[in-house]
Image: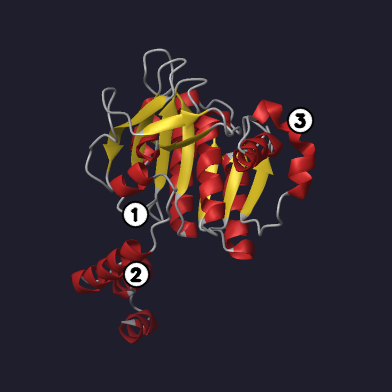
């Protein structure tokens, strides 16, 4: 193509040199592979490799009813969002999962946007001692006497964190410490709303960016979300669009029993984890508090 174009350009009588060069440019572009195309056979092989890996790399939460529903645990490369009313137990659930992951030697990141890392650590330490978090000050001697244990949790706390801050922390801790999961408490507190950006557009961008981060880091991200008075997530359309799995945690005021409703999922069947008449979890207020499977009572 280039030789033919040069021959035509060498012809001094050819006044259409602009057309010749444009046609040459178009021809080169049309003949140059972009690297985006892949045969269906290659894509199918990629799918099989991904399915094989997914089957062997679930990250257990330590809550048997939830893990059973997920086929063994959280899926790498996915964003799971859990909505709950205020004071239902979002932070306690994150602390529960973090505690369980540490017990299973699973390195992970705990991003505390509502409460500091010390408050989450308080719940986990109180659970280990079998006391209530607000009584922990009475047991300082017991804390000092606890048997040394290898820790597998890294805390991040900043009340002004943006989604890019979180992405950096997740990718850094993935590379530096090999974290296998990230927990974020909670979604609506992520800052960085751009000028002229609506709240819905901001939260949509945040959720989509975190979903992409879960894929890039090849780990599951579990993030809590605040429900409003009508029982839906604030700006729920953004959450439903970006998350691979969206659950709602229900617990009546002053009750211990809880269950989860599946709102949307592209990684499991849309089946609830228990019901109001058959709760699957209990909030143990005497140790932490923390959540545990109700079947262990």
User: Residue 276 versus residue 201: which sits nearer the camera?
Assistant: 276
The image's colouring method is secondary structure
Figure check: 108 above or below 7: above
Q: Is residue 183 visible?
A: yes
CA distance for labels 2 and 3: 73 Å
Dot 1 lies on which element? loop
Picture residue at 59% right of the left edge, 45% below the top: 110
Q: Earlier in the sequence, mark 2 or mark 3?
A: 2
Figure check: 22 above or below 158: below
Q: Quadrant of residue 259?
A: top left
The mark tally for this picture is 3
Question: Relative to residue 217, is residue 114 drawn left or right?
Answer: right
CA distance for labels 3 and 1: 38 Å
Residue with the most extreme left position:
40
Q: Which residue is mark 1?
A: 72
Q: Which numbered mark, 1 or 2, is in the foreground of this view?
A: 1
Q: Earlier in the sequence, mark 3 or mark 1?
A: 1
Q: Is residue 186 visible?
A: no
Circle on res. 138 = 3
Q: Is there a contact, CB below 8 Å, between mark 2 and mark 3?
A: no
Dot 2 lies on which element? helix
Q: Which residue is mark 2?
A: 29
- The x and y percentages for residue 173 are 62, 57
Q: Quadrant of the C terminus?
A: top left
Picture residue at 44% right of the left edge, 48% below the top: 62
């Amino acid at each position: 193509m280039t030789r033919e174009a040069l021959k035509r350009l060498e012809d001094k009588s050819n006044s259409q040199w602009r057309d010749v060069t444009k046609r040459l440019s178009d021809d080169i572009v049309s003949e140059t592979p972009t690297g985006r195309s892949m045969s269906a056979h290659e894509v199918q092989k990629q799918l099989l490799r991904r399915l094989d890996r997914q089957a062997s790399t679930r990250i257990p939460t330590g809550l048997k009813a939830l893990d059973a529903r997920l086929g063994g645990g959280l899926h790498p490369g996915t964003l799971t969002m859990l909505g709950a009313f205020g004071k239902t137990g979002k932070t306690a659930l994150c602390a529960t999962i973090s505690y369980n992951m540490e017990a299973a030697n699973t390195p992970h990141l705990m991003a505390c946007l509502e409460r500091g890392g010390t408050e989450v650590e308080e719940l986990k330490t109180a659970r280990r001692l079998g006391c209530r978090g607000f009584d922990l000050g009475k047991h300082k001697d017991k804390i000092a006497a606890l048997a040394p244990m290898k820790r597998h949790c890294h805390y991040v706390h900043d009340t002004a964190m943006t989604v890019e801050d979180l992405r950096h922390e997740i990718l850094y801790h993935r590379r530096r410490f090999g974290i296998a999961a990230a927990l974020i408490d909670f979604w609506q507190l992520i800052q960085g709303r751009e000028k002229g950006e609506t709240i819905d557009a901001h939260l949509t961008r945040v959720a989509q960016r975190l979903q992409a981060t879960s894929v890039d880091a090849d780990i599951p991200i579990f993030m809590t979300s605040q429900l409003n008075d009508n029982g839906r997530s604030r700006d729920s359309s953004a959450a439903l669009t970006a998350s691979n799995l969206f659950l709602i945690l229900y617990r009546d005021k002053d009750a211990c029993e809880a269950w989860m409703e599946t709102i949307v999922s592209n990684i499991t069947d849309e089946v609830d984890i228990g019901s109001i008449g058959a709760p699957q979890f209990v909030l143990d207020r005497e140790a932490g508090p923390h959540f545990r499977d109700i079947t262990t009572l």
